Amino acid sequence: MTDSSSQTADSTTADAANTDAIENIAEEIDHDETISLLQDLVRIESPYFEEEEITEFVYDWLDERGLDPEYHPVSESELTGFEGNNVLARLSGTDPEAPTLLLNAHMDTVQLVEAWEEDPLSGRIENGRLYGQGACDMKGGLAAVMVAFEALAETDLAGDVVFSAVVDEEGPYGLGANQLIRDGVTDDCDGVIVTEPGPILAQEDIENPALLLGARGRFLYDIGVTGKAAHGSQPHKGTNAVVDAGRLADALADIEVGTHERLGDGSVCPIEIDGGGETLSVPESCRLLVDRHVVIGEEKDQVRADAERAVDDLALDSEVQVGFRDAPGPDVRYGPYVTDPDDPLVAALSAGVEHVSGDEPDTGHFASVGDFNYFGHRAGLPTVIVGPDGENIHGAGEFVYTDEVVEVARIVAAGCASLLGNG
């Protein structure tokens, strides 16, 4: 028989050791070194499909610290012809029964925006803000996860930590994260932390430090509208596909959408009408793209039926074919998901927040989509977004709050130490 006082003593010792690990690892992360890394990342131009330079930088940074990175090939030949690489690394814990966590960030940005009034790759710092294209989305989160991973390498852990810096999050298909799932990288993982910017893209009005515990999903309608050509001086003799596409876009924007107690309401936004252009001709054909964000319970067949019902209600003279944007595979889509607030990953990150900031975290849910949808929906893993905030995401004047980058790095490291225990 085991002595109960001995068990209590062992538990107390283990708790104390874990608390020490959390405290020590947060203190390991240096503010100035983290921001210097962030500046280096921002100064590398890396729009999606053009990530070679930043991929090499991340690999070399890890390699110089003895963290054994590897290139993980990403390939998609049918739709994009893309060939690139993610960067992976792994820390092995001492207990094969302990959890494995995936730390994820993307390396790419949107294309450089022309409206910048300064160098969009400057990494300039002013009043606690670091400026540059992608500074907030998400090189701040990438820097945070890199230094957190380095700090974890100096900590005795029971469980494993997998680092993934991926390509093409900003592109049309999330090819880097898709490849992780395709190649089984996520198969032995028990949870995922993604350091995307948080409160600025949340459904709720929240502030950092915050944990986002789910996200809406997305479909992209790709609708063909076919009318009848005629001379532009006699439009009554034709059927104008552009006009009918415009009427349909207006109708789709007003369709009834789903709602969810945690993810809020779905949404519909027409984003492109492309057709016509012939001189003095009634446009015969037109293509309409419509973005639809969905919540749990809104599946593909229902989403298609909603659009077809809108078409029927309009009784257009044009013929309309409702479809969806092509994807690399039938499972490659951004499905909605929620993470249980009682999941051990959430508790561990909450403990990290409380240690680093002295506060309890706000909680919310992401308004849009990203790699986290692949992990939370397709891979079915508890997935939490915790990232630094800023402003002007995807636009001129984008910046990230430097103190939040460092805080997120410390929260991620402390949260991992809390969950994975002392080795």
Image: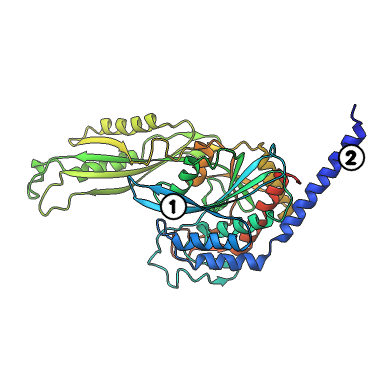
What residue do we see at 74% from left, 44% from top? 421
Residue 14: x and y in percent read 82, 43
Q: Nearer the viewer, residue 24 or 140?
A: 24
Q: Is residue 174 above or below residue 323?
A: below
Task: Say left or right for 378 vs 275.
Answer: right
Badge 2 local density, few (<14 within 10 Å), some, or many (20+)? few
Which type of secondary structure does the marked residue at label 1 adopt? loop
* Residue projecting furthest to the top: 1
Task: Say left or right for 352 vs 389.
Answer: right
Residue 3: mark = none
Three-letter code for the amino acid on which mark 2 is drawn: Ala
Q: Which residue is disc 2 drawn over?
A: 9
What residue do we see at 49% from left, 71% from top? 122
Residue 72 seen in the current view: yes
Q: Which of 34 and 280 is in front in this view?
A: 34
> What colouring style does the render use?
rainbow
User: Which badge, 2 or 1, comes first in the chain's sequence?
Assistant: 2
Q: Is residue 308 above or below residue 22?
A: above
Q: Which of 1 and 395 is in front in this view?
A: 1
Three-letter code for the amino acid on which mark 1 is drawn: Asp
Residue 259: x and y in percent read 48, 34
Q: Which residue is disc 1 drawn over?
A: 168
Discs 2, 1 touching: Cβ within 8 Å: no
